[in-house]
Amino acid sequence: MKKISFLFVALLVATMINAQTVATQKHVIQSGETLYSLARQYQVTVAYLLELNPGLQADVVMAGQTINVPAKAQQTVGATAQTAQYQVSEAVRPKYKTKHEVQKKETIYSISRQYGITATQLIEANPSLKDEKLKKGAVLNIPYSEEENRAFAAQQKAKEEEAKKPVVQMYSTIKVAVILPFASAETKMSVESQKMTNIYQGFLLAVDSLKQSGCSVEVFAYDESAGEYAFTNMLNKPSMKDLQLIVGPVRSNHITTVAKFAHDNNIVHVVPLSDEYSLVNGNPSLFQVNLPYSQLYSQVYNRFVVNHRADNIVFVNMNDSGDNMTYISEFKKALNDMGIQFKSADIADMNGVREALSTGQNNIIVPSSDAVGAFENLYKRIDGLNLGAEYAVQFFGFPKWQTFHTKYQKTLGKYRCQFFTSFYSNNESWRTQQFNSRFRRWFNQDQHKSYPRYGEMGYDIGAYFLKGLNDYGSAFYENIHNYAYTSLEFPFNFEKKSADSGYQNRALYIVTYRADGSVAVR
């Protein structure tokens, strides 16, 4: 596909400073600035700024205060977090702490006590005292005390550790490659190519939004379906090594190839669609957006208990092709382990279901199947019980239930249906409505109607990762939990699977339909 570039005003310039040779200049602290933000701006450490400003305290700076900073920041091209390091100048202190002129009646012992040292230390610093008597007016070398030596050693060690830390490289322009099977050779777009194009379109809308904060981005789109030769040729382009972010691809063999390339070149790699659990193994630069629901079940059970510990919980076996008995059996085991009581019934025995319900509690019915037929069977049979107002009944179901909204909206509200999901497009949200309107204006079309909404997925990926790279530069990995992002459709909570693996998205929504027709997403 055609290269598409967006060049906006640069917010920050990547720099690297050598502390042994750099000159200084004055900087007037502005409102909101801290020593940490200035250290990032001038590409030095907080410790070095403190060295340039004796008496300054890291946590006590005020707007209007003038401090010394490096005279000029030099742009770094192609520097990485592994290679750009801060050089610490050699620490210099006098051989002795001070000099002391001996006064009348002073002794070696009294002078030693005065400076917190031993008599032996004083004599070692002044060898003449071994053979000569202490005389008034004599000038003695006063060594550092053991406590002072320990403090100095600790300070030097801290400086050495600080020196080992990589300089954070800020990106004046974030370069991104979006690699997806756009099927650009098709005469008529297939459903799949529409979805892939929607991801890219949503990503471009995120780029446009971020330009308001001064974020500059260049986006390059590549058609994964163009063939193996084109794919290999794409990765061999020298410019690919200068990327900060890759989104895609989709095919398993391509993901493996790109994951290695991204790791070798210190590029953040986002895989939007694959739910293969082992995907992140050995790929520390990889971020997996979609995780199999089976890996999120423990979170489902814990969130359920938080909301429904005091409720009357009833599991209903649906005897349906969509039954997920692994999920149900693990659910029951989790409740047992937490000391939460529950009941079980069968859809074929509605008298048994009625007997399991309680008039004094909220009744939570958990069906075993996510199939639409099972949902219809459940609500129609519960309707058939003609329960009075004294029975409060609520259904707890599956991610697939969000696809029932159009046809079963009233039923979802009537039974205050609740389900877990890793994504949800809330059409009632003003942000969703605003996005859809914007999407329509930009591309003269609506998003393809699917679950998930791929345009919103692309927007969330773009907004989250571009903001992180813009705010934290090469320190993005260390700061993924330090900034908040309110998602449009996909919440993000990335965790490493193991020490040497990439990151998996373990975020989860609980969606609740209310009786008044509104929807709560938490």
Image: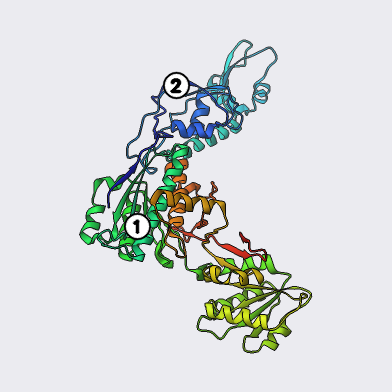
Q: At 53% across and 77% down in the image, what residue appears?
A: 372
Q: Percent position (x, y) of residue 446?
A: 43, 57
Please, is residue 378 above or below residue 445 in the view? below
The crowding category of the residue bearing disc 2, from other C-alpha atoms within 10 Å (few below 14, some 14 to 19, many at least 20), is: few
Q: At 30% across and 65% down in the image, what residue appears?
A: 253
Relative horizontal placement of residue 5, taking residue 158 as reference (left or right) = left
- Which residue is more in the foreground, 331 or 372? 372
Q: Is residue 487 visible?
A: no
> Which residue carries the number 2 mark?
24
Amino acid type at circle 1 is Ala
In the rendered view of the protein, which quadrant contains the C terminus? bottom right
Q: CA distance from mark 2 to mark 1?
A: 42 Å
Q: Which of the 4 quarters of the picture holds residue 311?
A: bottom right
- Which residue is more in the foreground, 405 or 512? 405
Q: Percent position (x, y) of residue 247?
A: 37, 54
Amino acid type at circle 2 is Thr
> Which residue carries the number 1 mark?
259
Q: Are marks 2 and 1 in contact (CB under 8 Å)?
A: no
Q: How many marks can you see? A: 2
Q: Please, what secondary structure does the residue beneath circle 1 have?
A: helix
Q: Which mark is residue 478?
A: none
Q: Please, what secondary structure does the residue beneath circle 2 have?
A: strand
Please, is residue 345 above or below residue 137 in the view? below
Q: Is residue 440 visible?
A: yes
Relative horizontal placement of residue 193, taking residue 46 as reference (left or right) = left
Q: Percent position (x, y) of residue 174?
A: 38, 42
The crowding category of the residue bearing disc 1, from other C-alpha atoms within 10 Å (few below 14, some 14 to 19, many at least 20), is: many
Q: Which of the 4 quarters of the picture holds residue 145?
A: top right
